[in-house]
Amino acid sequence: MQRCIWHAVVALPLLAACTRDVAVAPVMRRPAALLATASNVAPTRLPILAYHRVMPGLDNHMNVSPTLFRQHMQYLHTNHYKAITLDEWHTAVCCGTPLPEKIVVITFDDAWRDQYEHAAPILEEFGMRATFFAYTSVIGTPDYMTWAQLRDLAQRGHAIGSHSATHSDLARPFGHEDAAAYERRLTREINDAQRLTADCAAAPVHHFCYPYGYYNTNVIAQVRATPYATAVTVNPMINTRTTPLHQLGRFIIAPWTKVDDLAALLTMQALPVLASSPRDGAILSGAITNLVVRVPPGATLPLARVRMKWNWRWTDSAYDPVRGVIICAVPAPLKPNLYTAQVHAWDAHANHYAYAWLFQQNAAARPPLPAAAATAPAPRRTLVLLSSPGR
């Protein structure tokens, strides 16, 4: 009970922001054994859907027509999915409250006006609730919602979340920013945007959406300290009760996501990864040679086929079922950037398992090479992914 009360308190949106420590330890996944002590409820699968535009006649890779959106909602309704809020998920994870067997969270990014005009009526036609993530700088401008429309959505039972102030990349400073300027921008984008959104939308704002899906351990720490109860990424995977609440995965829904594709996403399984190195959200300052993901060996979760995606493209990989290891060779040293990786696996019954994560490579500080070594060809490096089931 004390744990439930504590989580309820930190979820309040208007608490004063805390000072963050720049040196942040990687976020650790909750051990299943620890969760079991708080609840006897079995782990629940949570797919989160991410929509953007819902506009008739708009040719855009982020636009889903109202006709297709209605088909999606009809499928959820017909197949008895309950659209829960992120508040309900947070309470279930932290306090062990039960949830229905088939659940989904529906989210919308950017607060486009067509979400209010076209998506909201369809949602309500099928009894669905959604979370609308707004970034404050565009509210009231052409093509975007007004604060009055966001307040109306909140009064109709939908949730309002923060998508920052200006939708800028939070994981990296701009070229002209020193450390202090970068800190001030993070405060404006994460803390100040939360308070402004809560005030102007006249609604609690407990949930954050990382702009572009970019984050790292430092950004996560500031989001947690604001505090937001949850934060969502664009890592395409199913969430479970062990998924960190501030690194929840989502499926981006596109115009080519037909009903059969939606059904496949909803029935995907979470690959039970035990640990990864680099960890999800890690910031790397040196050269990386191995990417390691540990999962139980094949006897625990027999997999018939395993593939990897590296920065959204399929790549060659090899799977060792005895050790539970997937090995993937990629070019290295990595250039400074944000990188995504995915493991997709199928068992003998064609059940699809997936795990996805992100890490950041900063410029590596290297001493000058001796004159003789400077002319020698650089050795080829490989990035190795060791995988096992489970996140």
Image (cartoon, helix red, strand yellow):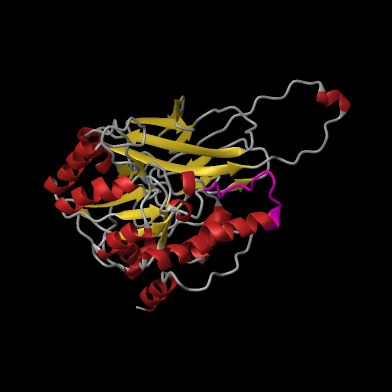
Residue 43 picture quarter: bottom left
Residue range in magenta is 168-180
49 with respect to 82 (left or right): right
Relative to 334, does residue 14 appear above or below in the rendering?
below
Residue 330: image location, x then y, percent? 55, 28
- Residue closer to the observer: 282 or 172: 172
Is any atom of residue 310 visible in this view? yes
The residue sitting at 50% across, 43% down in the picture is 358
Q: Quadrant of residue 180?
A: bottom right
Task: Please say if 7 is above or below 182.
Answer: below
Question: Which residue lies most toward the right here?
Answer: 371
Q: x, y (%) of residue 310?
A: 48, 32
Compare residues 269 and 232 and report the one nearer the observer. 232
Residue at 25% across / 62% down in the picture?
A: 157
Q: Which picture quadrant has residue 14?
A: bottom left
Prevalent SS, magenta region: loop
Query: Can residue 382 be found in the magenta stretch?
Result: no
